[in-house]
Image (tube, rainbow, N blue to C red):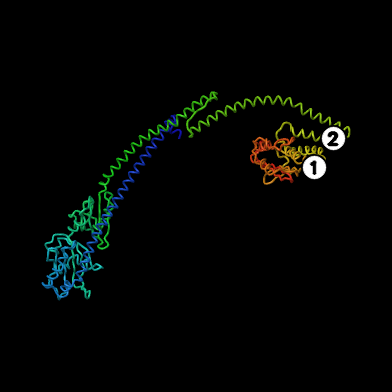
């Protein structure tokens, strides 16, 4: 990756930010704008499609209303006694005149019915001509024999429900002189009395009039009614009536020769150029279709696109300006910090940077100032420690005379006691010599546990000589931990406190028990006595006090208490990561102090 962009690695941080952030923001804004445009376009198209579907449903409902009116009119004819009389008793001029006067007002005032043809099929009453009436009066129609030879009669014979919905063409000459397409309901006429088939009923409505009624306010949409054979029955453009749907202008006329009209609607829905919605009538099975050209819709959506791209351009300019300002805000403090660090490299530890605010850059400046101050302090401390080390080396050379003088003096006292036969004084001198030797430990800070226990044993021996029969002591140590290395003088101060606070105030029968053992992967160092004990408040204060706190109130304030408990806590915390210090005491029962050190822990050389 480094080899791919070598120049990029050497430009300034400000230019890197501008190079990376500005294209990213432009792409983000662009994608967001385009996505918003397509979302808005999709919403508009969906709303238009829903609006079209509502138009199709509304037209289908109106068509169903006309169909229901036609069916109601046919049922009325079944129940009308005048029509029943003409069909059952014979077609005479008088009966025709009665039927005409009875039905003409209904047809004139009706919205959907424009023609009625009734063919009597009873041979004994057949007059030879069908009964035909239109809104203008009596008319003529093709004979029953001629009608039985048409495709309509053949289709009626094959139907299962006994009626069909279809359309008469002017070229069929079923109604001579009528040059309008007729949408018709064809069904047998049955007698009300015996339900026998006595005639054939054809009720029609003009397709032109139906088109004007359905599509008087269609807007820019193209609408039409299509039957299950793919024939247009009504349309916004009445020139389409009677044509297959594949011959409409929305189809490519060069590719319709092999397309059957009943598949035309499915193919039309597959054209991405148009938005097509349709609704199917439950009564007739005809489709109410609404079509709109998608390209016209896209022209309306161009306004949305123009607004979107304008917003993208404005946001891009603002983004470039804001990115430049942000880069300046970030890089200027970095430059200031860099110049200060260069001065620091030359040894100028007075360098400080001052950033306003408490953000990440402000905190960085604060940390930098703190770091420079600490480096200066550390350098001063190192210099001072080297001076102290030199002084300590001189003092060490001077102090080497003191232990030799002390040991030689004690040996001389021991020899004198042995010469005089005073064994007790000799033992005390030897113990005191051991205490000094083990305490000094040749200047080493760490001793093995067995040496610490030996120091405690000699110290208690000397104290025993001092207090004679006022106390006794017991020392136990597991052999497996006798070589455990530990800071020297951890146990001796605790034993000294036990002497001062437990043995001296008591009148006798004192007991001190020093133990070293393991428990749950920890080494337990314990000093217990049967002295007067301490109040609970003092015990809690001693246990909870931090190791670094001065021991003004935490030391067991006795004149010869030895090393303070705080010193023990400090050394435990210094040399062991998980060491524990605990005091358990009951007034009148005694005190027990435990040091718990994890085996294998960091002992700084232990």
Please rate how many residues cluster around mark 1, counting C-alpha atoms within 10 Å: few if below 14, some from 14 to 19, many from 20.
few
Residue extending furthest left? 93
Asked which quadrant contains residue 90, the reply is bottom left
Q: Is residue 171 above or below residue 492?
A: below
Q: Nearer the viewer, residue 244 or 11?
A: 11
Q: Please indicate whether residue 339 sits to the left or right of residue 416 in the image.
A: left
Secondary element under disc 1, as helix, strand or loop, is loop
> Badge 2 is on which residue?
425
Q: Nearer the viewer, residue 232 or 72?
A: 72
Asked which quadrant contains residue 26, the reply is top left
Secondary element under disc 2, as helix, strand or loop, is helix
- Of callouts 2 and 1, the N-terminal one: 2
Can I make out residue 391 in this image? Answer: yes
| Screen quadrant of the C terminus | top right
Asked if the residues shown at circle 2 and circle 1 are in contact, with their CB atoms under 8 angstroms apart, the answer is no
Please rate how many residues cluster around mark 2, counting C-alpha atoms within 10 Å: few if below 14, some from 14 to 19, many from 20.
some
| Residue 267 x/y as whole percent | 27, 54
Q: Is residue 585 above or below residue 416?
A: below
| Residue 296 x/y as whole percent | 25, 46
| Residue 512 x/y as whole percent | 76, 43
> Badge 1 is on which residue?
507
Q: Is residue 30 above or below residue 353?
A: below
Between the residue at mark 2 and the residue at mark 1, the CA separation in whole angstroms equals 26 Å
At 73% from the left edge and 41% from the top edge, which residue is drawn?
482
Q: Nearer the viewer, mark 2 or mark 1?
A: 1
| Residue 411 x/y as whole percent | 82, 31
Q: Nearer the viewer, residue 385 or 352?
A: 352
Asked which quadrant contains residue 28, the reply is top left
Q: Nearer the viewer, residue 552 or 572?
A: 552
Can I make out residue 449 in this image? Answer: no
Residue extending furthest right? 420
């Amino acid at each position: 990756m480094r080899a791919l962009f070598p120049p990029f690695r050497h430009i300034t941080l400000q230019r890197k930010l501008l190079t990376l952030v500005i294209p990213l923001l432009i792409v983000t804004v662009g994608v967001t704008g385009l996505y918003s445009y397509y979302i808005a376009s999709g919403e508009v198209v969906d709303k238009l499609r829903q609006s079209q579907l509502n138009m199709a449903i509304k037209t289908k409902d109106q068509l169903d209303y006309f169909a229901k009116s036609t069916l109601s009119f046919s049922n009325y004819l079944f129940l009308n006694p005048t029509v029943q009389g003409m069909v059952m008793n014979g077609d005479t001029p008088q009966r025709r005149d009665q039927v005409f006067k009875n039905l003409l007002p209904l047809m004139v005032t009706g919205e959907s019915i424009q023609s009625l043809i009734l063919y009597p099929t009873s041979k004994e009453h057949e007059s030879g001509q069908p009964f035909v009436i239109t809104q203008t009066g009596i008319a003529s129609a093709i004979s029953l024999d001629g009608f039985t030879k048409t495709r309509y009669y053949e289709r009626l014979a094959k139907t299962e429900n006994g009626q069909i919905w279809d359309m008469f063409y002017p070229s069929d000459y079923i109604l001579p002189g009528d040059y309008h397409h007729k949408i018709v309901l064809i069904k047998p006429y049955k007698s009300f009395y015996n339900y026998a088939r006595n005639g054939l009923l054809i009720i029609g409505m003009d397709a032109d009039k139906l088109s004007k009624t359905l599509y008087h306010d269609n807007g820019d949409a193209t609408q039409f009614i299509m039957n299950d054979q793919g024939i247009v029955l009504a349309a916004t453009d009445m020139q389409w009536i009677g044509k297959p749907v594949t011959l409409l202008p929305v189809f490519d006329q060069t590719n319709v020769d092999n397309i059957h009209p009943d598949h035309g609607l499915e193919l039309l829905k597959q054209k991405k150029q148009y938005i097509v919605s349709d609704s199917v009538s439950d009564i007739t099975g005809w489709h109410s279709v609404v079509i709109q050209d998608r390209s016209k819709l896209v022209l309306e959506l161009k306004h949305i696109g123009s607004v979107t791209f304008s917003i993208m351009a404005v946001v891009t300019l603002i983004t470039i300006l804001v990115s430049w300002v942000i880069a300046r805000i970030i890089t200027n403090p970095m430059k200031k910090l860099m110049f200060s660090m260069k001065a620091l490299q030359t040894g100028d530890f007075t360098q400080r940077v001052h950033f306003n605010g408490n953000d990440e850059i402000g905190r960085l400046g604060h940390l930098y100032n703190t770091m420079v101050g600490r480096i200066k302090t550390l350098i001063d401390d190192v210099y001072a420690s080297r001076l102290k080390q030199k002084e300590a080396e001189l003092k060490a050379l001077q102090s080497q005379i003191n232990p030799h003088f002390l040991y030689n003096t004690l040996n001389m006292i021991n020899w004198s006691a042995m010469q005089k036969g005073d064994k007790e004084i000799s033992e005390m001198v030897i113990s005191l010599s051991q205490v000094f030797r083990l305490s000094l430990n040749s200047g080493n800070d760490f001793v093995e546990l067995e040496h610490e226990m030996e120091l405690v044993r000699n110290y208690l021996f000397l104290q025993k000589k001092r207090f004679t029969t006022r106390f006794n002591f017991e020392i136990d140590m597991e052999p497996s931990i006798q070589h455990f290395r530990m800071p020297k003088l951890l146990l001796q101060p605790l034993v000294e406190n036990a002497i001062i606070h437990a043995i001296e105030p008591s009148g006798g029968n004192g007991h001190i028990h020093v133990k070293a053992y393991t428990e749950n992967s920890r080494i337990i160092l314990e000093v217990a006595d049967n002295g007067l004990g301490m109040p609970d408040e003092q015990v809690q204060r001693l246990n909870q006090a931090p190791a670094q706190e001065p021991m003004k109130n935490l030391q067991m304030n006795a004149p010869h208490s030895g090393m303070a408990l705080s010193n023990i806590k400090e050394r435990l915390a210094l040399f062991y990561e998980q060491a524990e210090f605990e005091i358990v005491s009951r007034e009148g029962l005694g005190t027990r102090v435990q040091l718990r050190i994890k085996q294998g822990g960091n002992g700084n050389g232990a």
